[in-house]
Image: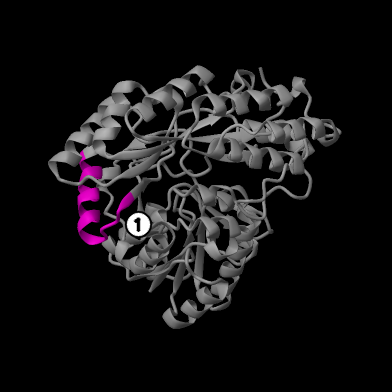
Amino acid sequence: MILLAHSYYLAHDAKQQARMKPYPPLATLLAAAVLRRGGHPVALFDAMLAPGVEAFEDMLDAVRPSVVGILEDNFNFLTKMCTVRMREATVRMVGAAHERGCRVVVNGSDSADRPALYLAAGADAVLLGEAEMGMLELADAWTADRSAALGGIAGLVLPATRGDVVRTPARHGLRDLDALPLPAWDLVDAGAYRAAWTGAHGRMSWNVVTSRGCPYGCNWCAKPVFGRRYTQRSPLSVAEEMRRLKDEVAPDHVWFADDIFGLTPEWIAELARQVKRLDARIPFMMQSRVNLMRPAVVRALAEAGAEEVWLGVESGSQKILDAMDKGTTVQEARAATRALQAQGIRACWFVQLGYPTEGWDDLVMTRDLIRDERPDDIGVSVSYPLPGTRFHEMVREQLGARRNWEDTDDLAMLFHGTYTTAFYRRVRDVLHREAADGADEGLWAALEMDEPAHRSETPLAAAAVPA
């Protein structure tokens, strides 16, 4: 028996628990479906609604698997943040499986960045990149021989005899995504997800993915699993999955978990046609970029069922957008928001505070953009240096022992930004008030008065930011 698991426990994340928008581990379920197709019996430990690692240990004792794969849901942005709580949970889970004599493999953003940590905890291998085919090859090898040599399997990091690590040749990413089976939805407790969602929001949402990767080059965006390539399913394949999802799970809403949904007007228009033909329409939410939200695209999204689009607006300051290598303009953010709202689609923004050289004037520009365009919702974060990014290289010498947030509500400045963590948390709260309730000059006046006292003693110099 192969036991698949992931380590994102909603119970460990107070902010996300309060939001109560849990999604099943999509990438893990796709790997389970591939293993089943390859003839392997598979069980799943779904950490999302579990109380803690003790529940995983109980399942280990009940199932007694020979192989354990701790495969994170690489489509869920929460796992990409590599929080301390997730890392601690994964290490405990690896140790528990190792102690019971299981062969253990780990896959995810953090294990890709720090494979030695997980090998030291007891993992036999760290699987880099997409999990499906590598997991299948490992399962085949370990099923035939528990002591099988793994050097011939691409995309692995293995322990070395002298305490270092050995890397096998890189694995190429999947190209024909339509050839993958549907996720193994039956392995999760859909009723528990329905109860959580309907209790908090009156309807249930489910996750689907139509592509892998992102072709854009924002210099703070980590891509340890899919890289910068972009691979896409056919619109027909996606519409057929939505039809099956309606029949087998019956969600009221879908979250398309792609980094960039659709990418081209032609793909989105064809999806709308196929969804209509198959009677597969389910209201959905997705993520995109402001430069892609042209009027014709937005009309096709509305026809396909889009009710909410999240846009990486990031800042109201063009100076900051250019420093990020964002490749978008403030005017494009305005135009995209207006185009979406004109079609009755909620336009929601991701806003990022604290990027190097951001000053008070830049914060005011972001505030004014929110006031002018009135997005339907915003999510506010601070710049977060993740390994493998140009941004991480810029601030690496300023990073101390702490390099990750405890949970998703931490909002700690991990490098020397212009302002302190406490100040950025206040700005976040005031921006949320702006988006929800409108202008509050008193709150901004208080922030401006306190601003000098919260400046960092050693902010990253402007000369360190790439032109």
Magenta stretch holds residue 24: no
> Which residue is labeled 1 in the image?
203
- Name the foreground residue: 442 vs 270: 442
Q: Give the quadrant of the C terminus.
A: top right
Residue drawn at 70 percent across, 36 percent down: 443
Residue drawn at 31 percent across, 61 percent down: 184
| Predominant SS along the magenta part | helix
User: Considering only vertical position in the picture, is 290 above or below 352?
Assistant: above
- Residue 234 seen from this side: no
Residue drawn at 56 percent across, 76 percent down: 54
Q: State which quadrant residue 190 falls in.
A: bottom left
User: Considering only vertical position in the picture, is 112 above or below 64?
Assistant: above
Q: State which quadrant residue 353 falls in.
A: top right
Three-letter code for the amino acid on which mark 1 is drawn: Arg
Residue 197 horizontal/vertical position (percent): 40, 60
Q: Is 50 on the left or on the right of 447, as rendered?
A: left
Residue 391 horizontal/vertical position (percent): 65, 32
Q: State which quadrant residue 306 falls in.
A: top left
Residue 375 horizontal/vertical position (percent): 48, 32
What is the magenta range?
A: 236-253
